[in-house]
Image (tube, rainbow, N blue to C red):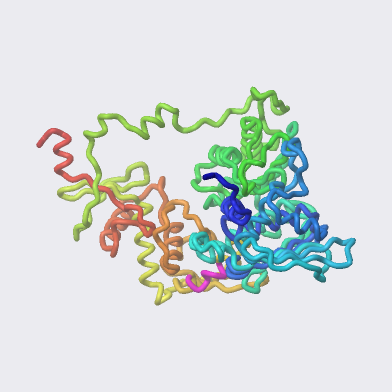
Amino acid sequence: MARIRLMPEALANQIAAGEVVERPASVVKELAENSVDAGARSVFILIDKSGKERIRVSDDGIGMSPGDAKLALERHATSKLSSVEDLATIGSLGFRGEALPSIASVSHFTLRTREASSDEGHEIVIDGGRLVKEGAAGLPPGTIIDVRHLFANVPARRKFLRADVTEASHIASIASNLAVCYPDIHFRLEHKNRTVLDTPRVSSPRERIYQIEKTWVETAIELDDYVGGLSIRAWLAPPAESRGASSRLHVYVNQRPVKDRVLTHAVMEAYRQASSKPGTPRAYVLLELPPDAVDVNVHPAKSEVRFVDQKLVHHFVFSAVRNALQGDRRSGQVFVSSGGASSGGSSSAAREPQPSLSGTEMAASLFGDPAEASRPTPTFTEFANVAPTPVGQFRESYILAADDDELWLIDQHAAHERILYEDLVDRGDSGEQQLLLTPLPLELTPSERVTMEEELSQLCGFGYDIEAFGADGYVVRSVPASLSGHDTLRLVRAALGEEERECRSSSVIEAKSRIAARLACHAAIKVNFPLAMEKMQYLVKTLWNAKQPTVCPHGRPTTLRIGMEQIERNFGRI
């Protein structure tokens, strides 16, 4: 009896969908990219319930004939590749021929399209991979794809989707990133009957970034450099500007938004040499190079790339960004790699960025020395009623404190985060406010605006007075009393971000607690920050009086201790 057999087509498409369609934002990405490849001048995106219930992408591109429309829903059908050689020179965003059949297999899918030369359009309706309807339809030239009830036939996949605000934020990021790559296309995103992104056609990436970031780009450092076959255009936050989550760094290769370790490391290393500030800077980095110098066929989602000469690309980007940050606008310093690629540049060789640990040091730090076993082991403990006495600060990050029986090591950031969190939660209902002398205008990215719509009531519950102002902005009139001494705009924008820079666990689920935890995390004292003795005493005493002093709001421990018995045993006294 035969054990191996061909999969049914519907099953194969659902398996492929697991790689291509990770979440609603994946659907938006694939459909919007198809619109760009179709030569659209306008791409309009509408989502309902953060894309879980509906995603509609319409464009005014070249459209498809009835035959092409039906063929486009077959696996591996594409208009962008015809031979193996074409893989080396991919110039389109899509090319694998997997997206449409994969999406149609896990949703109620409607494709309506019309070529400009045709008198009528064509409609195809598919439900969970099964053809339901096909025939003529009246519509203007272009293509409209309507995806409803995503993952309805795959409930296990639907359970893994994040909160609505998170999914909508990802969609806004996808749309705004594509808009940066293609300033000559009008992108619009609507969510909950409100326009989240609206970027009419402009002539340059800078004008497009201005549409998204507005006043930020006016203070950004502009970079425009070219060496050999590599060119870079970038808008970089000044080194002294506050940093944040990794989503602040936008990287594009050949008009394709990507996530690439080589480019991210190059940019971050350039900033590290310009400033010691922690976190990720806000930056838009657009890299162009010959298609045969980069492989975009690395992952089905097409968000990863691989460079033929990684060292050459890294050195070019690193030196160009570093020189721009240091005020040196000369061409980036690059070198001739072992792969044979070469380029011009300054006669002095660029210093290659070195890792902070050698291989031997890294191994030692990971696996340790056998003698480590004899050293004191810090342990958790129940807090006594009386707080220990601070005696100093270790590496400007940890408070050393002592009582009669124990030595305490207190994480100053986690401790302050716990204190601020409990203060916000306890005073949230009363909404104690500090009125600002001058209301502050708050400009948000499309992703941040989506989050603000969902969580504005929570922020106001803590004492913020924030209201919509204009088509896409807000104004802040008051802040929580406990946060009055902080940079208001930076703190609000940080609270709208999905990632926390210091605390990365996700144990805080409930909306009110989640917002309080974000505010506390970004407002708390950071590591590598010197404290006066009075401040250390305040933090330790207040922490000991907290309701839950042992952990920060995200579940990370606030303290470690070494008992007197352990100390004396390791000194051979007992």
Task: Assign the C terminus to one quadrant of the image.
Answer: top left
Q: Name which residue lies at 74% across and 55% down.
A: 72
Location of residue 441 with respect to 342 vertically, above or below: below
Q: Position of residue 465 (x, y in %)?
A: 52, 73
Q: Position of residue 273 (x, y in %)?
A: 55, 37
Q: Position of residue 69 (x, y in %)?
A: 77, 58
| Boundaries of the magenta span | 452-458
Residues 193 and 129: in front is 129
What predominant SS class does the magenta segment belong to? helix
Residues 394 and 253: in front is 253
Q: Name which residue lies at 54% across and 65% down.
A: 165
Taking the image as drawn, is residue 83 in sight? yes
Location of residue 77 with respect to 28 vertically, above or below: above
Q: Quadrant of residue 225?
A: top right
Location of residue 568 with respect to 42 vertically, above or below: above
Residues 453 and 88: in front is 88
Magenta stretch encompasses residue 430: no
**Residue reaching furthest to the left:** 574
